[in-house]
Amino acid sequence: MDAKKVLEAALLCAAGPLPERDLRILFDGAVDTAGLRTLLQELQHDWQGRGVELVQVASGWRFQTRPEMRVFLDRLNPEKPPRYSRAVLETLAIIAYRQPVTRGDIEDIRGVTVGSQIIKQLEDRGWIEEIGYRETVGRPALLATTRQFLDDLGLQSLADLPLLGGEDERDAQDALVAALQSGQDEDRAAFTPDLFAEDGMALVTAPDAAPDPAAADAPAPAASPATPTNIPPAQGQ
């Protein structure tokens, strides 16, 4: 059996991303890690120029529709994705770039009280979770983003988060939130790091290091939950 066809079938039928350790199980030890990655790269190349692409995200590999297909696929599923308030987006941005943080840390940065419903909304969406407690008075919970957050952004790690260049941190955050909010409109593409460049914002990438929290108060996805199909929507959905 053609190993590449086996990979293709497994990935197309999977309900979510498949890690490489699971993909190796398909071949019962006959394909090593290096060989598996070569096959995945070949499969990526085979699907270039098609409506669906093979990508690697935090949880593994998956097929997803390309962002430019969204406007057409939305006609099959006209339900509007959930919209997130500015407060929710700012809170998620702070957690993403300054994690782990406590609720008090977020309130200090935003300058306003963070309502319990904001934290719950992000937890229910699967974007943040409690990872421990700070050893101080009251032992407040420490919040961090999840693998689901990275998967929904189409990222492999936090180091892939885009940074926004600019001298004024508050202006940068305002611009980011505005871009994310507009990204929720039905006539706009799903969130991708390129969204910021399309809006005339300068992106600074840091491929070999995690983002500097001081650079910006960062992006949050304006995504809808994945639709129940074998091939997930383009990232951000």
Image (tube, rainbow, N blue to C red):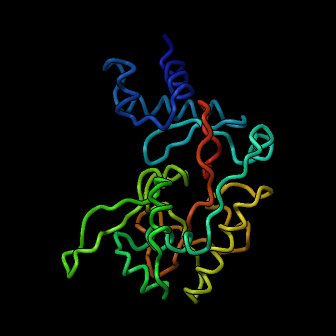
In the depicted structure, whether residue 195 falls above or below residue 57: below
Q: 229 above or below 77? A: above
Residue in front for this viewpoint, 89 or 119: 119
Q: Residue furthest top?
A: 1
- Residue 216 % position (x, y): 52, 78
Q: Measuring from the top left, give residue 237's x and y in whole percent.
A: 62, 49
Q: Is residue 200 left or right of residue 62?
A: right
Question: Residue 184 lies in what quarter of the image?
Answer: bottom right
Q: Does 181 sit left or right of 20 as displayed?
A: right
User: How many tags in the picture?
Assistant: 0
Q: Is residue 132 left or right of residue 168?
A: left
| Rendered location of residue 193, percent (x, y) | 61, 61
For residue 43, side relative to residue 97 (left or right): right
Q: Nearer the viewer, residue 96 or 26?
A: 96
Residue at point 43% right, 56% down? 157
> Which residue: 81% across, 41% down?
75
Image coordinates for residue 196, horizontal then vertical, percent: 66, 68
Residue at x 41% of width, y 28% of height: 23
222 in relation to 38, above or below: below
Asked whether 68 or 183 is in front, the reply is: 183
Residue 91 position (above or below residue 25):
below
Name the residue located 48 percent from the left edge and 88 percent from the top edge: 111
